[in-house]
Image: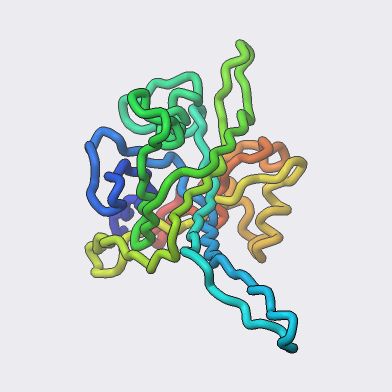
C-alpha cells in the first residue's frame, strides 16, 4: 500500500511593510483545518466627471485612484480534534490568539499593524488584516470554549498581481496534497444527508468510519467532515 502524503496546511506569516520580506520566523501560524474556500475581490475607484453645461452626452467614467484587492476566508480551531504533537491546550482561544496577533496594533506604535502573508500551496496573498470575526461555537461543562470559527478579511491597497508559492513535489512527482476540503455540518443535518448531497449516499458508512463518527445522525453544528474520505482498500483475502 503506498504511503500517505502529508496534508499541506495553510499558514499565516508576518512579513515586513514592503509586503515582500519575511519577518521573524516565530510569527507564523499553521492552521488546524484548511479553509473550504478562498474569496478574492478586486475593486477600482471609478468616478464619472461632471459634464460642462453646454456639452451634451454622458461623460465617460474615469479611473481616479489605486484599487484594492481583498481576500476573505474562514478558519476553524477545535481543541477536541487532533492536535499537533505536544499541544495540550484546553481553551481554543489559546489557538485563535495567534491569528488575532495580525490585527493587533503594535504596542510601541498604535497606528501600525503587522503585514501578513497567507500562504497555502501555490496560493499567496500579502496584505493587512482588515477585519476579524471570531465565533465561539462549543463549550465544556466548565464554560471553557473548545471550538471557534474565525472569518478573516485581508486587504491590499492596490490591484495585486497573482503570486504563486512554491509547491513541494510528492514522491510520485505530482503536486503535494493540500486541497481536500472539509465540510462543516449544518445544524440538524445528518451524515447520510450530507453524503447524499454529494452523490455519495451509497458509501456514507465508509465516510463515517474514516472520520471516526460513531453516531451519523447526531452531528455537532459546524463539525468538520471530509466527505472525500474512504477506508483504504485491503488486499484480496484480507479482512478487517
Q: Most extreme residue toward the front, as rendered?
A: 54
130, 204: nearer the viewer: 130
Residue at 26 percent of width and 54 percent of height:
20
Colour treatment of the image: rainbow
| Camera-side residue of 237 and 137 | 137
Classify 229 as above or below 95: below
- Of residues 174 and 61, the one nearer the viewer is 61
Residue 61 percent location from the top left of the image: 62, 78
**In this picture, residue 180 sits left or right of residue 6:** right
Q: Is residue 189 above or below residue 171?
A: above
Q: Residue at x 53, y 73 (%)?
A: 63
In screen coordinates, is 157 left or right of 109? right
The percent coordinates of residue 10 (x first, y second) are 39, 49
As drawn, 226 above or below 99? below
Q: In this view of the protein, which residue sits in the foreground, 59 or 220?
A: 59
Q: How many marks?
A: 0
- Give the residue at x 45% y 51%: 239
User: Does the image show residue 163?
Assistant: yes
Where is 224 relative to 50, above or below? above
Locate residue 114, reporting x and y percent: 36, 39
Q: Specify the farthest residue to the top.
A: 142
Image x and y of residue 153, in percent: 52, 47
Toward the right, the furthest residue is 188
Residue 9 in view of the camera: no
Quarter of the picture containing the N terminus is bottom left
Quarter of the image holding residue 84? top left
Q: At x 44% / y 55%, what residue is drawn?
A: 156
Amino acid at each position: 500500500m503506498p504511503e500517505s502524503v502529508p496534508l499541506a496546511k495553510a499558514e499565516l506569516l508576518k512579513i515586513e511593510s514592503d509586503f515582500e520580506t519575511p519577518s521573524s520566523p516565530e510569527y507564523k501560524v499553521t492552521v488546524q483545518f484548511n479553509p473550504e474556500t478562498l474569496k478574492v475581490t478586486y475593486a477600482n475607484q471609478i468616478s464619472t466627471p461632471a459634464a460642462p453645461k453646454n456639452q451634451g452626452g454622458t461623460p465617460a467614467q474615469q479611473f481616479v485612484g489605486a484599487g484594492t484587492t481583498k481576500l476573505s476566508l474562514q478558519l476553524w480551531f477545535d481543541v477536541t480534534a487532533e492536535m499537533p504533537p505536544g499541544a495540550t491546550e484546553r481553551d481554543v482561544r489559546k489557538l485563535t490568539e495567534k491569528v488575532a496577533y495580525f490585527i493587533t496594533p503594535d504596542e510601541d506604535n498604535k497606528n501600525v499593524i503587522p503585514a501578513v502573508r497567507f500562504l497555502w500551496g501555490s496560493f499567496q496573498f500579502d496584505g493587512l488584516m482588515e477585519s476579524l470575526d471570531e465565533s465561539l461555537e462549543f463549550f465544556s461543562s466548565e464554560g471553557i470554549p473548545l471550538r471557534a470559527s474565525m472569518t478573516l478579511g485581508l486587504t491590499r491597497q492596490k490591484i495585486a498581481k497573482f503570486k504563486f508559492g512554491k509547491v513541494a513535489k510528492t514522491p510520485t512527482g505530482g503536486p503535494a496534497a493540500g486541497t481536500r476540503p472539509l465540510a462543516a455540518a449544518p445544524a440538524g443535518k445528518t451524515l447520510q444527508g450530507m453524503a447524499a448531497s454529494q452523490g455519495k449516499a451509497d458509501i456514507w458508512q465508509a465516510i463515517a468510519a474514516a472520520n471516526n463518527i460513531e453516531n451519523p445522525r447526531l452531528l455537532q453544528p459546524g463539525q468538520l467532515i471530509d466527505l472525500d474520505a474512504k477506508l483504504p482498500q485491503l488486499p484480496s483475502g484480507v479482512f478487517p
